Every structure is written in C-alpha cells, then in structure tokens.
Image (tube, helix red, strand yellow):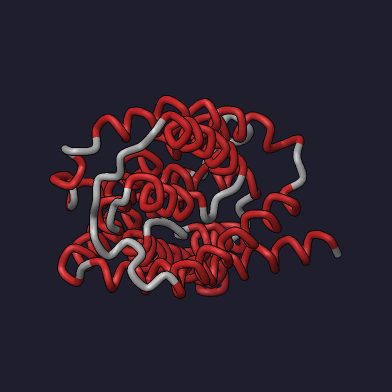
Amino acid sequence: MLYLLTPLVNSFDYSFYKFISIFLISFFSNTFSAISGGGAGLIQLPALILSGVPYYQALASHKLATVALGLGGSLRNYKSLKNDIYVAFQILLFGIPGVIFGASVVEFISEKYLYLFLGMISILLAFYSFFKSNLGLSSDNNQLNLFHKIRFLIFIFLIGILNGSISSGTGLLVTILLIKTFGMDFLRAISLTFFTVGIFWNFTGAVILSKIGSVPSNLLLLLIFGSFTGGYFGAHLSKLKGNRLIKKTFTIVCLFVGISLIIKSIISFL
C-alpha cells in the first residue's frame, strides 16, 4: 500500500513546491516591475516555460497575470491618473490596434530578431537613464506641437506591436516615452503605464494569444494573485520612496531586461 502511495505523495510534493515557487517568482518579479514600470517578463515568462508551459501559452498566461499587476498598481496610484485621462485615451486608441496586429502575427515572425532589437533598445535606455541624472525626477507639462503629437502616436502604435508579440520591456518603453514627450516624472508615467499597458494592452494581447492554445488555469490563478499583490506592494513602495528609487530600479531593470533578451536572441541563432 505504501509503495503504491509513494508516487502520489512525491507528485503532490513536487506540485506543491512548484506552485509555491511560481507564486514567489510572480510576486517578486511584479514588485520590481511595479517600481520600474515594466520588466516582469524578465523572470516570470522564463519560469513558466521552464515549468513545461509552451511559449505561446506561457506568453498568454503572463499577459493575463500582468493585467492583475496593472490593477494592483493602478489601485494604489489611482489619484495620479485623473489629470492624464486624455493621454491614456490616446495610448489606448493607437496602442491597442498595434497590440492586436502584433499578437496576430506572432506565429509568423521570428522572435530572435524582435528579442535582439528590444534588447538593444532596453540597454540604451538603461545607459540613457543612468547618465541623464535629472530624468523623471520632476514633473512638467510640456507644450506639444503637431509634430510631437504625431510622433508620440506613431511610437505608441509601434510599441503596441512589440507588446503583442513579445513580453519583456514594452512597459519600460512606454514609461520613458511619456517622460520624454510630456515631461512627466517616473511615478506619474508609471501610473499611466500600469493603467493602459498593464490592464488594457495586456488583456487584449492575452485574449488573442489564448486562441492559439489553452491557458493552464491552475498556474494562472497563482500568477494572477502573485501579480496583483506584487503590483500593489511595488506601487506602495514607490509611493513611499519616491522618484529616485523608481529611477534606480528602472535603470537596473532596463539593463537586465536588455541583457536577457539579447542572450535569448543569441541562443535562438545557434
């Protein structure tokens, strides 16, 4: 009898530790993401793939979980959004079509080139943030001409395409774009990124990607809970510590996201 129960017990222990480890990975990766404005996929997506979930299902699961991250972060910083509703509307109006297009063609494009491109961009952002000492530490309201408005909308559409096709780094791109275009500080820009990219972009991409393959519901619940609690906790920390902590975390996360994506790209070329 004990002999027959042994495989069952071992399987239970393995599943229990696997679920706990995935929850902890989700919580901590989304905590750092909530502080920096993106990058949860740096740890969370590889963890899902290593647990045996196919890439497209893992990507859909990750995107659904980051909706919870967006909700957690927005819930903590909802007061920061009231003055930027018009900007949020533009991000949704021009970004979601890009997300739909990117998620629709992800099966037909080579991930390795996207990883390489976004990895290089992320590393450049890290160095830019490091050497630009005052970047995002104070909030202004830049007056935009027509050229600046059109350029912003084009970039939002292109970042939306990247968001729909790969997981890591697009929130960071939107955050830095908001800072450079509108003169926002990090806290204000990240609050807007959570609301638009975290909730609406990722939900749109997850719905389209989930049609490629079913999403594992047992892992998804853990990811959602870990993402929501991590997002709320990270947003709480950033609110307490201010823009200097956010800027440092943003720089570090950008660097590691970039290195991770370039390594992925190199491995896929081999």
Answer above or below: position of 141 versus 100. below
Question: Residue extending furthest right?
Answer: 270
**Residue at the image position 68 percent from the left and 37 percent from the top:** 106
Closer to the camera, 157 or 29?
A: 157
Give left or right: position of 106 versus 82: right
Q: Is residue 55 visible?
A: yes
Question: Percent position (x, y) of residue 52?
Answer: 62, 57
Q: Quadrant of residue 35?
A: bottom left
Q: How many marks?
A: 0
Q: Nearer the viewer, residue 48 or 137?
A: 137
Tell me where residue 123 appears, x and y as whole percent: 58, 67
Residue closer to the observer: 179 or 91: 179
- From the viewer's perspective, tell me whether residue 167 is left or right of residue 246: right
Q: Is residue 1 visible?
A: no
Quadrant housing the C terminus: bottom right
Which residue is rendered at x = 45% and y = 39% of the image?
Answer: 202
Q: Position of residue 75 (x, y in %)?
A: 19, 47
The residue shown at (50%, 36%) is 151
Q: Position of residue 91 (x, y in %)?
A: 40, 33
Position above or below: 11 against 224: below
Q: Residue drawn at (29%, 57%), measured in percent from left and top?
A: 231
Q: Is residue 59 above or below residue 35?
A: above
Occupied quadrant, residue 98:
top right
* Residue 141 in the image: above or below residue 20: above
Name the side, left or right, on which 247 lies relative to 232: right
